[in-house]
Image: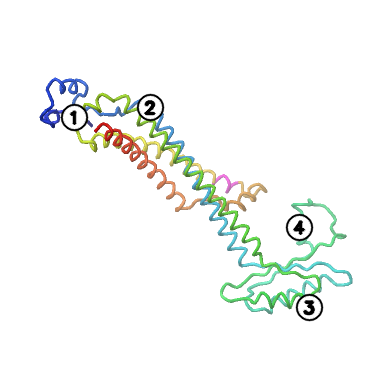
Amino acid sequence: MVVVTGDARGAKGGASSAKSEPAGRALRRDMPLVPAASIAGRALVTVVAIMTFLAALTAGVAILIADASHDWQDDVSHEMTIQVRPTPGHDLEAETNAAAVIARKASGILAVEPYSKTESEKLLQPWLGSGLDLGDLPVPRLIVVKLDPASSLDLGALRKTLEAQVPGVSLDDHRMWMARLASMAHATVAIGLVVFVLVLTAMMLAVAFATLGAMAGNREIIEILHFVGAADSFISGQFQRHFFRLGLRGGAIGGGLAILFFFVTGHVIGWWRATPGGEQIEALFGTFSLHLKGYAAILVIAAAIAVITGFVSRIIVFRHLRRLN
């Protein structure tokens, strides 16, 4: 709030009463330097709310993908796959059992689960469809090997033993897939960070233009206050508090909408999980639940945007007043 008193008008003893009188008429007692309610202020609140929502949405999706990628890599790193391909003149069932026995004897393996012929054929249904007779196709058998995190496995020795005793066998430790998952997650998080920075930049530009507009509308009052001795920090502080309140309102609205979006979407996907589409979304994003750290990140973003809004306004006003000096 700006209050013009006799002390303020006499702050620079050399100021005349003729120059002080217009200031008294322009600024009534307890009149704010920047109007609290205006069309420009409501528009800025809307812009800040939209930018906060987009920034929170970007950060939330990046957190979801990073968590899902961590879960994928954790699951894949504790599993291996042994594939036994059918070869002419050999019994596929016997070779599958032999490969499972060799894997069970190796140290560092927690469990070995051979897939039956029916289970192996079901793995092809998403690509070939159901109801097909795959009896004439050379469908390989898979053996899922669970690794023991508490002990080490000599992967090279196990691979050599399998290749020496079981024809048509291959061992996949999923290292290639883990590298691809990590690269995809890192790229997605990097893209999210770029979008986040662009949103913040657009918001700061909007705040800058709004501050310049408010200064233009109150140019005479600002210059009079400046010339009668009001400190630059006092005038810029008036703008900072005004725009901080606008940023706080916009950040609260945008952050609240983002929290509501993730909360509702998580529950909807939870209900939709039984469908094929829901299973695919869950495989990509996990449970689509941000948990406590995700919601805390959104609150931090909303608060930071309010602080940035006030700070940008203060810097612009302060630089303008310095030019007047």
Q: In this figure, which residue is indicated by the disc labeled 4?
A: 122
* Along the viewing direction, whichever of 285 and 270 lies nearer the viewer: 285
Q: Position of residue 25 (x, y in %)?
A: 19, 20
Residue 11 counted in the magenta span: no
Q: How far across and down, in percent of the image, does residue 324 sit?
A: 26, 31
Q: Which residue is mark 2?
A: 40
User: Mark 4 and mark 2: span between their CA atoms?
Assistant: 61 Å
Q: Which tag, 2 or 3, sits closer to the chain's start? A: 2
Quarter where residue 122 is shown: bottom right
Give the mark toward the camera: 1 or 4. Answer: 1
Q: CA distance from mark 3 to mark 1?
A: 93 Å
**What residue is shown with label 3?**
165
Give the residue number, with chain letter if any, for mark 1.
3
Ranked by sequence position, the earlier of labels 4 and 3 is: 4
* Labels 1 and 4: the sequence-earlier one: 1
Horizontal side, residue 132 vs residue 191: left or right: right
- Is 318 drawn above or below residue 301 in the view shown? above
Tell me the SS state at disc 2.
Answer: helix
**Do residues under tags 2 and 3 come within 8 Å of each other at their CB atoms?**
no
Q: Quadrant of residue 31?
A: top left
Q: Badge 3: few (under 14), some or many (20 or more) residues near its Cα, within 10 Å?
A: few
- In three-dimensional space, the C-alpha distance between marks 1 and 4, rounded to whole angstroms, equals 79 Å
Which region is colored magenta? 266-271
- Please name which of the two marks, 4 or 3, marks the residue nearer to the observer: 3
Image location of residue 213, percent across then percent down: 36, 27
Disc 2, disc 1: CB below 8 Å? no
Quarter holding the C terminus is top left
Residue type, numbered disc 2: Ala
Q: Secondary structure at mark 4?
A: helix
Q: Disc 4 vs disc 2: which is toward the camera?
A: 2
Depth check: 8 or 133 in front? 8
Q: Amino acid at mark 4?
A: Lys
